[in-house]
Image (tube, rainbow, N blue to C red):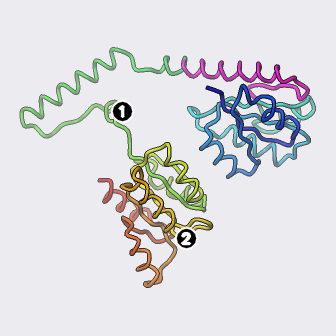
Amino acid sequence: MKKKLLIMGNNKRLITDFFMQLDFYFDCASTSLIAPDLRIHYQFFQPDAIVYCMHAESRDNINSVIRFADGAPKDDKVPFIVVADGSDYEFLCKMPGGRADLRIGASASVSELQSEISSVIARHKNNKIEGKLQTAPKLDDALDTLSQLDEELKKLESGDLNVNLPTSLLSALGRPRILVVDDSTIIHKAIKGYIEKDYDISTAINGAAALRFLKTKEVNLILLDYEMPEMNGAEVLKALRENPLTASIPVVFLTGVNDTAKIQKVLRLKPDGYLLKPIDKNVLLSKIKEILG
């Protein structure tokens, strides 16, 4: 399977080379340097490396890329590769946090690009595997967890309902995942701050992005903005209900509408609930617990 590269930058010649001459080796996608665009491409394309093809980049562009490359969660980070001549790369290195896992000269040949990028991706993958092996649960810990579980099961058999499952087992069972669909990143951040302690959170900036996400990911609940440009909440809900794979996912509308007639219109769509903006933390948590238990 070809490795995936997310490509960005002002060096259009190099970017064209990736798509035209390196297509045999890599599956490439390009993105603008606008922060929401970067995040959406990264989330849905899931690249094996980020490639920044530099050419007379502005300070703002470089800052955007550095913040993006440095801001991914540790377990989700991929190699950050810069293709640039010396002066461009020196400019990047002078910026706060400016660093790359690999720098390749802008005049590198196609074969050099393929070889260097493939090598750094392979090294990164090996390092992640080694890290997971080092932090993997020890056999003694696993046996201890099984022993604790056995003791708790014996309590249940004897009629004792005061059971405490091992923490490691509870963690392994996973947490409900909630998808927040809203064109406002402020709403994303607010809801994440309210509930990330108890739930795993994914976000989508619009309805189309949410539907793409749900083609490959499972969620337990969707918090859906009712009023979005292009594809509004009603249209997204209709698409969800028409797809057998998503028809049963509970959907709660988020809406700034407080007019009684309009609220009745929302309820006719038969969502699993609706919440008025600005979102109240306690009301949100209560609704989630009502649906997910």
Frontmost residue, 23 versus 29: 23
Per the rendering, the mark at residue 227 is 2
Q: Quadrant of residue 289?
A: bottom left
Check the picture and name the quadrant holding the N terminus: top right
Distance, label 1 to label 2, CA atoms, is: 37 Å
Closer to viewer: mark 1 or mark 2: 2
Q: Residue at x 28, y 17 (%)?
A: 143
Q: Residue at x 37, y 69 (%)?
A: 270
Q: Residue furthest left?
A: 158
Image spot of residue 37 (x, y percent) = 69, 50
User: Quick check: 291 above or below 57?
Assistant: below
Count neighbours of disc 1 (C-alpha within 10 A) and say few if under 14, some if 14 to 19, many if 20 or more.
few
User: Quick check: 209 above or below 137?
Assistant: below
Q: Residue furthest top?
A: 139
Predominant SS along the magenta part: helix
Mark 1 residue element:
helix
Query: Of the residues shown, which amino acid type is indicated by label 2?
Result: Glu
Q: Residue at x 42, y 53 (%)?
A: 246
Residue picked out by circle 1: 172
Image spot of residue 148 (x, y percent) = 23, 25
Give the residues drawn in magenta, as a range: 100-129
Frontmost residue, 153 versus 261: 261
Query: Of the residues shown, which amino acid type is indicated by label 1?
Result: Ala
